[in-house]
Image: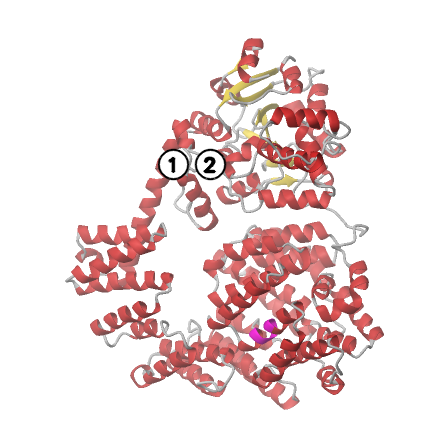
Amino acid sequence: MNFSELQEELKHKERTIKDLVEYLKTRTVKSNPNYNLLLGAGASVTSGINSAQDLVKEWRKEIYSLLSGEDYQDNDEEVRNYLLTKQGHWYSELNEYSALFEKKFDLPSQRRRFVEREVDDKKPSIGYAYLVSMSNANDRYFDTIYTTNFDDLINEAFYQFSHNRPLVCAHDSSVRSLSISSTRPKIIKLHGDYLFDDIKSTLRETESLESNIKNKFIEFSKEYGLIVVGYAGNDRSIMDVLNHLLKSDDYFKNGIYWCIREGDTISPELRKLLWKDRVYFVSIRGFDELMAELHHQLKKELPIKDNFVESKQEIILRSFQEDKFKLSDSSKYIKKDIDNLLKHKNNIVISDLIRELASSDDKLIDDISESEFKNLLEIDAKIKSKHLKDALELARGQVEKSKNTTIKIRYIKKVIYILRELNDINEWGNYCDKLIEIDSNNVEYYLAKSESIISLYARCEYLKSLSDKFSHVYKFNNFFAKTALNEIKNTNGISFYSIDNVIDLIEKSLVLEPSLSNVAWNILCDAYSMKYSNCFDHKEMKECDGKVSDLLEKADGINNKHITYFQILTHSVNRRIDQSKIIKIIDELKECFNISSISKKKFIFDLICGEHIDMLDKRMDNFDYKPYYREFYNSDLIISYKDKEKTAAYNIFISLYYLNIELNVDLFKKYIIEASRCDDAAGYTGKIINYMCDVIGDFELALTFLNDVKNQISDDVYYYWSANIALIKKDYRKAKDDLDRALKEGRSYDEYLVCKSFILIHEEEYNQVIALVNEKIDTVKDFENQSILTLNREFSSKKLNRKIKETEIRNIIGRNISDNLNLCCNILLNNENAALRLIEKEQKRDQSSIETFLRWPIVSDRFYSELNSRSLFRNDSTNVVNL
């Protein structure tokens, strides 16, 4: 039945959006709505998720061609007849989506992966922004939102556009404790969540709702009416419950209002339901248009706050403004709000420019003409919209025209910024020379020019030539020291400066500016870390500890509550510590947390979480970190800190807690994904990608995350992790190309060699591994990296049936650098019992280690079956504890 036929048959049952507005207004108080909302797949289409209709059409074609052996001829009627007559034992025309879905994907895990790919990285459409506003705790028109969808669009919209965090129930056990009296918005996923394998999508799976969800649905239906949007009513699970409840006058006292688009096909089940008392239908153009009209009639325009446009919000709002689905053409309300967003965006650009001009020169705002302000504004607008070449042409033109020196400097800086973005090295340097011609004593101009020099060695030479001119400027010494440190890490030969030369530069900076606001304190920690990286001699260890203690004592003497003091305290160079010192550091951080401002609390909270994460990495004998994990997980600090979910460190800690304490794989995955969505996730890029690739086993998810944080990380970090992801995808050519690019952008040469040899092992290019290691191992500075390269070489020799160098392997064990290296050594030496003991020890410490070992050819070659049987992620019989 089509919509016009429905209107003719059930004209007395049709209601309007205006009617809905009046019904929604009948609240007794602002915090007590009368209606809940049920959303189906149709609500997600304008967020970029394929509709069930589109998927059915594609699957029908594929399955028909596969089973019939005939090419699809764009004749749906013929295909349906074939499926009904020849495949009727599994095919259901009434529930075609579920039948085809189950036929295409045999296993629940396959269906989960498909759904995950479909919904991943999708951004909520503007309709969800309206919905969030109408679910505000202080003035709400919707209390509970049911959804048959697996996507996270509703929760993401709340996260971005509201301070109210909804209660999300995605599986049967989690819904039991949900209270109808809770003032927080409630999202109930009737068919599960894509993060879990128990999503209900197939014909058999959607026969009934889980018992707890069904009972909660029934409980909530006593108090509220129901508005249905984007749901066709094609699965029995929900329709059976609705039909059952409508038999009693105690349920849906405020009615059910089923919103239908004019082009929709009405299923027989929905048609039957609409004949029942208290059930009506409403004609709508779409989910977004409906939400827009309801919002404007109930709460007026979409609220726009001063801080509305930032980070992920900016991306989502930009998608609103682009209006890919032309929603503004079909809704005057959406058009009005998109116009307001554009005006607000322009106002922000103007405000940003004013702040930029004010911060650079107090007199500049007063001196700048209206036309020059307009030009600068136009350049910024083009930069923000990524029209870089147009922005460059405009800025260059203004450089040539400008007579005012101060304004000319501003235009040149715009040109340099654009050239950086376009990676035009030569022109970048030339425009820096123009700045130097204007002001030859401005150190910033020389530093900008130095960054246009690709070779780190040549950059150091250039900076050395400026030493006499700027040695009295502490920022120059800091920049020179950081550049020299990177050059030492990156070079495979003789460095421009020794590490002691670098330390002299930093110490000079601290003499010039001893305050804790000087980043030289942190750079000095990095320098010590590099100098003592191979420290196994007791005398050297004592020397390193002494230098770090002196540094901490000096910082303590200035201000032991300063952020820099805590950065030194938690720096990796301060990691030669025992259990008591770890706890002392955490206690000191907690003490500072309690007396800190809101902004500083976030920094300290991140450090506390980071210290707990590091407990897992320390691998100290006789130190059981698990009691401290339990204590922190249940602490008042975590329970009371409201902004914890926004920090990547917290979500990573929680994920590790669930994995290693509760053995809950699903929640580990959930919180790693939550960590990747945090604004500060870039600081944990490597750890998150390792977990996504090695443990969760989803390199596409990792690649999406890496591209999301690309603008927040350095190029060498981006290309290094891109190479690692390409390796997992077995795209070895790309892996090597990206690794070469990472080295060019400044990645450590040691890390480059280790990763290069690892790629070659996966390619089974064992002769190349041996040649690479033999040629380059003497240039490697770090003992651990030397050991890894040695093991990769000896493993390659073993694969080629050559004799291995047992003495060198035993020397690695003697250094006792790490249990993981000792594990590989014992495998190469055929000490299987010792290797198994180490595997068991690592698994007891960290369940994720098994997944890492499965990716290491040295380990998995010998113990693949053993590792596979131990894996929580590959063994469905694991006892998983759910909340």
Residue 461 lies, in percent from the top left, at: 37, 83
**Where is 405 relative to 702, above or below?**
below
Q: Secondary structure at mark 1?
A: helix
* Quadrant in the picture for residue 323: top left
Horizontal placement of 561 versus 862: left or right? left
Q: Earlier in the sequence, mark 1 or mark 2?
A: 2
Whether residue 152 appears in this view of the structure is yes
Horizontal placement of 723 versus 397: left or right? right
Between 595 and 404, the one lying in front of the other is 404
Q: Secondary structure at mark 2?
A: helix
Residue at 73% in and 77% down = 800
Count of picture labels: 2
Quadrant where the image shows the N terminus: top right
Q: Which mark is residue 872?
A: none
Residue 226 lies, in percent from the top left, at: 60, 24
Query: Amino acid under label 2?
Result: Ile
Residue at 42% in and 75% down = 515
Horizontal placement of 94 versus 500: left or right? right
Farthest front residue in view:
70
Instruction: Find out whether the residues at labels 1 and 2 contact each other: C-beta distance under 8 Å.
Output: yes
Q: How is the image coloured?
A: secondary structure
Q: Which mark is residue 338?
A: 1
Magenta stretch encompasses residue 210: no
Between 186 and 206, the one lying in front of the other is 206
Principal secondary structure, stretch drawn in magenta: helix
Residue 816 lies, in percent from the top left, at: 72, 81
Please tell me how crowded label 2 is: few (under 14), some (14-19), or many (20+) other residues with Cα within 10 Å.
Answer: many
Between 64 and 513, the one lying in front of the other is 64
Residue 267 lies, in percent from the top left, at: 63, 20
Q: Which mark is residue 126?
A: 2
Please tell me how crowded label 1 is: few (under 14), some (14-19), or many (20+) other residues with Cα within 10 Å.
Answer: many
Highlighted range, magenta: 752-756
